[in-house]
């Protein structure tokens, strides 16, 4: 007979007993808790009318679950609730539900039909990713679709989308017939230009468009673009690596980082008076950025540095004559912030001398002595875990070690988009995010890292140097060069499609200051391929054996190391305290 553990009307855990297949949750339950049925072997579940809330990962990886009856009383279905239910074929969502949250049905490869009410307004990140049997979807009133929402829905041919749709995340419809069979020059969904497939050199964005999507015009050989006043959002990478020579952005309220990055021919830009962190990164020919109607006395928008010239109406003399240089820096949080909330990690931070080499606190030995991982020595690290909490502990220690010991000029962490990293969202969202140690990427196949690798190889060759250290020494002596930080690519969930790029990085980045930390909880040969394993000869493996004092082991072919370690558990309070204490300061040197 089924056994339920409940508290105050919340079903916190279901304990499977042999023979349990068809489950009827008892009346009186109001909430199904987080991971309540995690990876159980049930075949069907009937939820009573008393339930209002289905928690995150409630039925995650119930790989025999084929039937679910959700009553109209349910108002909230949280992220990952039915993710990985590979035998689920159809489901109806109650009218009271207005949001399909992140990863709710991701990996439900046999889901053929889902009935959504007209009240659904938002589809979360990866909500239906990998639903390879889903052939159609109706979203008549949805105004926001998250990253990768329908990525990999290889049977999706029809999607009814709202004309009010104004936000579409990165790769939301990638790897679907719905997108692949669209033959239009401008792929427009709602008021979003999602992609451009024409051949024109001179582009005119249609009136009425409000959003230019991620990568919409990226890497196209366009020389000009006319952007109407209706456009209020230009997403990241929208015009990256294009042939644009000038750009006029009349009315945008948000321009994503790297939106015009590496446009080598871009010389002039007219932009609205908004934060521009990282928008024009790598535009070496950019000489003039104009902000119309900028009045004297306003703050100088130094967040678009480096530029050889900044021009603003009425204050040109002040900008070009008075400041000799503008320097920015992040005030690093003090370790004392953690003295009360996490004394063990505080003591570890105080006992280790961090230098310019990228190091982070890995764990502690049997005697409580902290041990660090030196990425200059080990280069790349593969982390295997059995559950998400172990990954969180590892990355918490890694990120806090970096934030509290290195400036953005020393270490830059490029995180591949994952729900975990959104706990650090305040660092990403500030206008100065490109001067933070942390910034987020939307490319789990690591193309951005490979591009950075080639960019650095080209730069080093042009400067006549071979290594990262040689280049930075040269940059300190030459005014026309900027020093480079160590770039650490942090991947929370390994995508096996990235294996070739992982191999490329492992073979070519050892002298370029680029490192990888890649984690996975799936060690199947499909995900953890032979090529990936051979590319990263340093492993950290977590275990759940309660009989041992340690919970992770380090193996490395570099020095034949085999070390047992105990990880640090850092509280959310400590993380929040550190984030809140990060400050950006400006120093302006005058003549």
Image (spheres, rainbow, N blue to C red):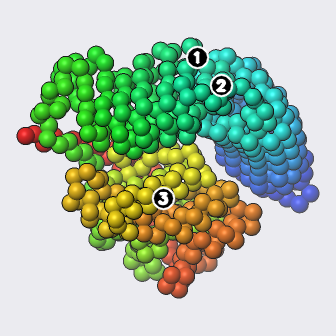
In front of the other: 543 or 403 = 403
Find out whether the residues at labels 1 and 2 contact each other: C-beta distance under 8 Å.
yes
Q: Which residue is mark 3?
A: 453
State whether residue 410 is above or below residue 204. below
Q: Which residue is mark 1?
A: 206
Find out whether the residues at labels 3 and 2 contact each other: C-beta distance under 8 Å.
no
State whether residue 359 is above or below residue 402. below
State the residue at coordinates (80%, 42%): 154
In front of the other: 283 or 95 = 283
Q: Position of residue 370 (x, y in %)?
A: 39, 74
State the residue at coordinates (42%, 69%): 511
CA distance separating discs 1 and 3: 36 Å
Q: Which residue is mark 2?
A: 186
Q: Position of residue 495 (x, y in %)?
A: 65, 56
CA distance separating discs 1 and 2: 9 Å
Q: Position of residue 465 (x, y in %)?
A: 35, 67
Side of 453 relative to 58 (left or right):
left
Image quadrant containing the N terminus: bottom right
């Amino acid at each position: 007979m089924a056994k339920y553990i409940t508290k105050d009307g919340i079903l916190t855990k279901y304990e499977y007993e042999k023979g349990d297949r068809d489950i009827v949750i008892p009346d009186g339950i109001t909430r199904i808790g987080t991971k309540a049925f995690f990876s159980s072997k049930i075949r069907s579940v009937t939820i009573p009318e008393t339930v209002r809330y289905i928690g995150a990962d409630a039925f995650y990886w119930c790989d025999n679950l084929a039937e679910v009856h959700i009553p109209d009383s349910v108002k909230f279905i949280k992220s990952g609730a039915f993710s990985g239910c590979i035998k689920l074929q159809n489901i109806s969502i109650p009218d009271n539900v207005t949001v399909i949250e992140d990863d709710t049905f991701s990996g439900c490869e046999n889901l053929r039909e889902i009935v959504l009410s007209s009240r659904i307004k938002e589809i979360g990140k990866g909500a239906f990713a990998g639903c390879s049997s889903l052939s159609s979807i109706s979203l008549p009133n949805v105004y926001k679709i998250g990253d990768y929402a329908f990525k990999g829905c290889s049977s999706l041919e029809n999607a009814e989308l709202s004309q009010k749709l104004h936000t579409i995340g990165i790769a939301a419809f990638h790897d679907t017939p719905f997108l692949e069979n669209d033959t239009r020059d401008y792929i427009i969904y709602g008021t979003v230009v999602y992609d451009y497939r024409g051949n024109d050199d001179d582009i005119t964005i249609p009136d009425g468009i409000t959003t230019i999507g991620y990568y919409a015009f990226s890497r196209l050989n366009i020389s000009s673009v006319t952007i109407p006043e209706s456009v209020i959002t230009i997403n990241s990478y929208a015009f990256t690596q294009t042939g644009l020579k000038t750009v006029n952005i009349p009315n945008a309220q948000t321009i994503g980082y790297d939106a015009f990055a590496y446009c080598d021919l871009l010389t002039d830009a007219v932009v609205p008076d908004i934060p521009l962190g990282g928008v024009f990164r790598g535009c070496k020919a950019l000489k003039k950025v104009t902000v119309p109607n900028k009045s004297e006395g306003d703050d100088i928008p130094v967040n678009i540095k480096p530029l050889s010239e900044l021009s603003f109406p009425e204050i040109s003399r002040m900008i070009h004559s008075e400041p000799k240089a503008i320097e920015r820096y992040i005030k690093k949080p003090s370790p004392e912030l953690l003295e009360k909330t996490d004394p063990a990690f505080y003591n570890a931070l105080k006992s280790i001398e961090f230098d310019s080499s990228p190091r982070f606190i890995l764990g502690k030995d049997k005697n409580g002595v902290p041990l660090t991982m030196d990425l200059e020595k080990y280069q790349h690290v593969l982390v295997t875990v059995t559950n998400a909490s172990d990954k969180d502990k590892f990355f918490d220690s890694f990120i806090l070690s970096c934030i509290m010991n290195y400036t953005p000029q020393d270490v830059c962490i490029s995180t591949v988009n994952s729900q975990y990293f959104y706990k650090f969202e305040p660092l990403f969202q500030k206008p100065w995010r490109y001067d933070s140690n942390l910034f987020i990427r939307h490319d789990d196949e690591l193309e951005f890292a490979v591009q950075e690798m080639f960019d650095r190889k080209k730069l080093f060759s042009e400067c006549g140097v071979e290594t990262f250290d040689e280049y930075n020494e040269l940059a300190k002596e030459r005014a026309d060069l900027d020093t480079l930080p160590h770039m650490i690519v942090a991947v929370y969930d390994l995508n096996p499609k990235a294996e070739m790029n992982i191999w490329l990085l492992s073979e070519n980045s050892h002298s370029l200051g680029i490192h990888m930390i890649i984690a996975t909880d799936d060690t199947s040969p499909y995900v953890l391929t032979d090529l990936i394993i051979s590319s990263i000869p340093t492993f950290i493996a977590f275990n759940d054996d309660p009989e041992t004092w340690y919970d992770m082991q380090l193996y490395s072919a570099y020095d034949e190391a085999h070390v047992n370690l105990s990880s640090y558990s850092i509280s959310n309070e400590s993380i929040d305290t550190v984030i809140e204490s990060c400050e950006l300061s400006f120093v302006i040197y005058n003549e």
